[in-house]
Image (cartoon, helix red, strand yellow):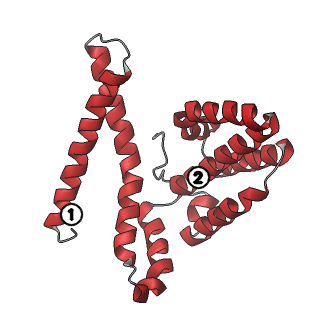
Amino acid sequence: MNDLGLYLPGDSLLHRCPAGVKLGGLFLLGAGSIFIDGVIPILAGLALILVLYAVAGFPPLLAWRQVKPLRWILLFIAVFQWWARGWQSAVDVVGVIVLLVLAAALVTLTTRTNALVDVIVAVLRPLRPLGVQPERVGLLIALGIRAVPIAVGFSSEVRDAQRARGLRASPRAYAAPLIVKSLRHADSVGEALVARGLD
């Protein structure tokens, strides 16, 4: 089972729901998140999202895996908000971020990437007279979605290589090979796009 947001096959109600409806709901949640204020609304929203994960047939552990990579960033945000504006602000900001991350992950977990891209391309098509190229935007989004698990895979490979060599955890020793692998992959993708006339 993948940890981050790529489609997981299923036959649940959420899997069968049209991609446009799910993206529209995610957009409304994002736009309405500025009105989510207080512990009770945030807890209610998180409970609803977890219920939707259960409806999709996903265990709570999968929901945790969507948030886990952000845990240190969220901790920093929480501490800063608490220091600057009080604990209520820390709960509001972190709670809304977690809620949106879980919702976005649920959409990608229950919707094939090509279905998401098709919806975005269709929405952008009326903007073609303004110079927007919907197909290129769709390709960019598809590559972005695909890049997340690839980067996570590179991260695991670098960590495993460090363990195999008996090296201690070092941010510099970890970051350098990860950046090199990521840049090489980006170069290969760029070359493939150029070869197909998409430069």
Left or right relative to 37: residue 102: left
Q: Which residue is mark 2?
A: 106
Q: Position of residue 1 (x, y in %)?
A: 46, 39
The residue under the point 68% across, 66% down is 28
Q: Secondary structure at mark 2?
A: helix
- Which kind of residue does numbered mark 1 sit on? Leu
Q: Quadrant of the C terminus?
A: bottom left
The residue under the point 61% across, 60% down is 14
| Residues packed near mark 1 inside 10 Å, few (<14), some (14 to 19) or many (20 plus) | few
Q: Which residue is mark 1?
A: 193
Disc 1 to disc 2, how far (Cα)? Answer: 29 Å
Q: Secondary structure at mark 1?
A: helix
Disc on res. 144: none
- Of the pair 7 and 137, the residue shown nearer to us: 137
Q: Position of residue 139 (x, y in %)?
A: 35, 66
Residue 10 visible to the viewer:
no
Q: Nearer the viewer, mark 1 or mark 2?
A: 1
- In which quadrant of the rendered view does residue 43 lie? top right
- In which quadrant of the rendered view does residue 173 lie? top left
- Which kind of residue does numbered mark 2 sit on? Leu
The residue under the point 47% across, 79% down is 124
| Residues packed near mark 2 inside 10 Å, few (<14), some (14 to 19) or many (20 plus) | many
Query: Which of the marked residues, 1 or 2, is nearer the chain's N terminus?
Result: 2
